[in-house]
Image (cartoon, grey):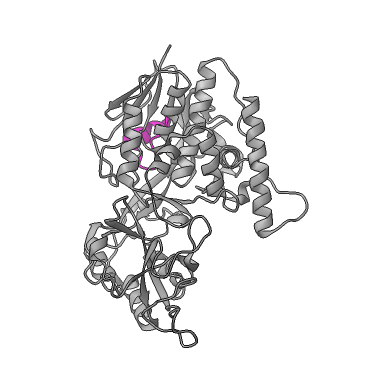
C-alpha cells in the first residue's frame, strides 16, 4: 500500500500520523528539526510545546475547549493520551510536563510499525507522492512557504505569537508569594485547604502595579523587519506589554486580575483569617511534572531578554528569579482556508494535498491537534476507498472545521480558538451556563451519531 506523507511533526502532524497508522496505513512523517531548527523550538522532539504548557480548560460541560478534549479522547487521540499521562496540577485546566508530553508522543510514533519518521527539510511535496498532508505549522520554512504561495495563488497571511518566560520554582520567594487557586477550587470542584493550590501568586499593591505597567511600556522591545511591520497579533497570545498599551487597567482585568485570591500575609480588616485581595497578582503555573519549573501565566512578551530579567525581577516574590527560558517572539503563518480547502481539508486546486494544524487558521494546541486528527481520518478513508463525511457542526471538532473551511469570508478570515460562538445556535433562547451545557450535550449526541455512521 502506498504511504501517505506528512510534512511537519508538530501536534497536527503527529496526530495525523497516528490516526493514519492506527487505521492500517503506512505513513512517512517528515520533520525538519534534528536537521534544521526553527526560531522558537528548543528540541528535536515531535509535538514540542513552544508556548504555554497548558491545553486550557478540561471542563467538557461549560467550556468548548474541554468539550473538544472529550471528543478527541473518544476519537483515540494520541495527543490527548500523552497529555493525560503527563498532566501536572493546574486547577480545572489540563497542563502538562512539556518534556514528558513530547517524549511520549515521539516514542509512540517512532516505535509504531507503520510509521517512518524522516528527519530533513521538505521544501515541497514530491510529485510522485499519492497524497501528502502539509502540517508544517505556524513556523513553516521559507522554502515550503514559497511553494504554498505559488501553488495556491493566494496572498500569504501572517501574525505574531509570543512566548511566556519560565522560572525555576526554587528561585521564587515564598515569603512573599503564596499558593492558591482562584476561589480555592480544585479541578473536581472541591476546595483546596488554606495554603494549597495549583498556582503561585505574586501580589502587587497599587503603586507597585503602576510602576510595573510603566516599566513594561518603557522597556526596550524586539524590533520588526520592514516587511513585518503591519502584521497583526493574535489576541489570544497578545504580548503583555502590548496589552499594557491598551490602558493602565487592562492587565488588572486580564492576566493580572486578583479576583478569587487573598494574600494570607495581609490581614483582611473584616476577617483577618482570610487575607486581603491584592491590587493585582502575577500568577505562575507548574510547567513540569517534577514541579521544578513554573511559567508566568499570560506573560507572553516581545521585550528584549535583558529587559525581561530587569522588569520581571521587579515583581514581588520574583526579585531573585532564575529563568529557565525567557519570552520570545515568532511569526505565525496561515492560509486562506475558506477559499483554498474543501470540507475534508484537501486543497481544491490539487486534491492530492491536504493541510492540517495551525497553518489552516486554527489557533491553540488542542485545536491544531484536532484538525490533524481529522486530516488523518479523512486521508485514511480516501486511501481505503471509503467516504467519511465531516463531523457535524454541532460537535466541537465539526464547528472548528466549519470555521476553517467556510465559516468566514476570505478577506476577514483570522485564526480562531474553538469556542461556543462557532456552534450552530440553539432554539429557545437559553443563555449562560444553561446554554453551554445544552450545546455540550447536543455535541456529545451528534458525535455519537457521526461515529455510528462512520
Q: Is residue 123 visible?
A: no
**Is residue 104 rendered to the left or right of residue 254?**
left
Q: Position of residue 340 (x, y in %)?
A: 53, 33
Determine whether 130 is above or below 58 in the image: above
Residue at 67 percent across and 38 percent down: it is 445
Dividing the picture into quadrants, the one containing residue 107 is: top left
Residue 145 falls inside the magenta stretch: yes
Q: Where, quadrant-wise, is the N terminus in this rendering?
A: top left
Residue 105 falls inside the magenta stretch: no
Of residues 62 and 425, the one drawn nearer to the viewer in this rendering: 62
Q: Position of residue 134 (x, y in %)?
A: 42, 31
**Is residue 394 rendered to the left or right of residue 200?**
right
Q: Position of residue 194 (x, y in %)?
A: 42, 70
What are the residue bounds of the magenta stretch?
134-150
Determine whether 293 is above or below 131 in the image: below
Of residues 327 and 353, the one drawn nearer to the viewer in this rendering: 327
Determine whether 118 is above or below 51 in the image: above
**Is residue 330 rendered to the left or right of residue 73?**
left
Dividing the picture into quadrants, the one containing residue 167 is: bottom left
Q: Position of residue 72 (x, y in %)?
A: 52, 37
Of residues 271 and 358, the one drawn nearer to the viewer in this rendering: 271
Q: Where, quadrant-wise, is the C terminus in this rendering?
A: top right
Residue at 29 percent across and 71 percent down: it is 174
Q: Is residue 163 visible?
A: yes
Amino acid at each position: 500500500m502506498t504511504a501517505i506523507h506528512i510534512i511537519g511533526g508538530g501536534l497536527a502532524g503527529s496526530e495525523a500520523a497516528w490516526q493514519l497508522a492506527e487505521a492500517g496505513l503506512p505513513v512517512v512523517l517528515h520533520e525538519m528539526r534534528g536537521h534544521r531548527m526553527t526560531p522558537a523550538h528548543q528540541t528535536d522532539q515531535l509535538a514540542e510545546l513552544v508556548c504555554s504548557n497548558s491545553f486550557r480548560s478540561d471542563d467538557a460541560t461549560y467550556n468548548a475547549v474541554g468539550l473538544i478534549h472529550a471528543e478527541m479522547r473518544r476519537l483515540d487521540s494520541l495527543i490527548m493520551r500523552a497529555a493525560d499521562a503527563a498532566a501536572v496540577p493546574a486547577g480545572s485546566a489540563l497542563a502538562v510536563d512539556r518534556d514528558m508530553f513530547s517524549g511520549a508522543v515521539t516514542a509512540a510514533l517512532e516505535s509504531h510499525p507503520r510509521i517512518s519518521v524522516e528527519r530533513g527539510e521538505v521544501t515541497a511535496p514530491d510529485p510522485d507522492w499519492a497524497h501528502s498532508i502539509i502540517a508544517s505549522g505556524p513556523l513553516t520554512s521559507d522554502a515550503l512557504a514559497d511553494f504554498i504561495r505559488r501553488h495556491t495563488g493566494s496572498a500569504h497571511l501572517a501574525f505574531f505569537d509570543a512566548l511566556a518566560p519560565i522560572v525555576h520554582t526554587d528561585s521564587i520567594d515564598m515569603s512573599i508569594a503564596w499558593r492558591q487557586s482562584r476561589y480555592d477550587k480544585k479541578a473536581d470542584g472541591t476546595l483546596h485547604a488554606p495554603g494549597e493550590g495549583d498556582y503561585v501568586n505574586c501580589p502587587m499593591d497599587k503603586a507597585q502595579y503602576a510602576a510595573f505597567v510603566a516599566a513594561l511600556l518603557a522597556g526596550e522591545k524586539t524590533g520588526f523587519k520592514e516587511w513585518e511591520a503591519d502584521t497583526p497579533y493574535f489576541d489570544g497570545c497578545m504580548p503583555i506589554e502590548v496589552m499594557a498599551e491598551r490602558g493602565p487597567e487592562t492587565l488588572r482585568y486580564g492576566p493580572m486580575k486578583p479576583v478569587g485570591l487573598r494574600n494570607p500575609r495581609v490581614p483582611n480588616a473584616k476577617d483577618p483569617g482570610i487575607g486581603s485581595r491584592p491590587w493585582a497578582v502575577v500568577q505562575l503555573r507548574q510547567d513540569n511534572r517534577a514541579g521544578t519549573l513554573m511559567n508566568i501565566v499570560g506573560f507572553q512578551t516581545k521585550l528584549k531578554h535583558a529587559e525581561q530579567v530587569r522588569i520581571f525581577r521587579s515583581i514581588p516574590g520574583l526579585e531573585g528569579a532564575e529563568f529557565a527560558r525567557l519570552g520570545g517572539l515568532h511569526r505565525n503563518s496561515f492560509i486562506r482556508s475558506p477559499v483554498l480547502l474543501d470540507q475534508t481539508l484537501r486543497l481544491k486546486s490539487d486534491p492530492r494535498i491536504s493541510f492540517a494544524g495551525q497553518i489552516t487558521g486554527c489557533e491553540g494546541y488542542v485545536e491544531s491537534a484536532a484538525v490533524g486528527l481529522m486530516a488523518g481520518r479523512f486521508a485514511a478513508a480516501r486511501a481505503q476507498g471509503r467516504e467519511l463525511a465531516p463531523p457535524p457542526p454541532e460537535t466541537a471538532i465539526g464547528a472548528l472545521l466549519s470555521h476553517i473551511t467556510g465559516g468566514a469570508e476570505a478577506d476577514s478570515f483570522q485564526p480562531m480558538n474553538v469556542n461556543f460562538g462557532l456552534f450552530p445556535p440553539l432554539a429557545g433562547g437559553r443563555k449562560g451556563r444553561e446554554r453551554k451545557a445544552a450545546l455540550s450535550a447536543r455535541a456529545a449526541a451528534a458525535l455519537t451519531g457521526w461515529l455510528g455512521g462512520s
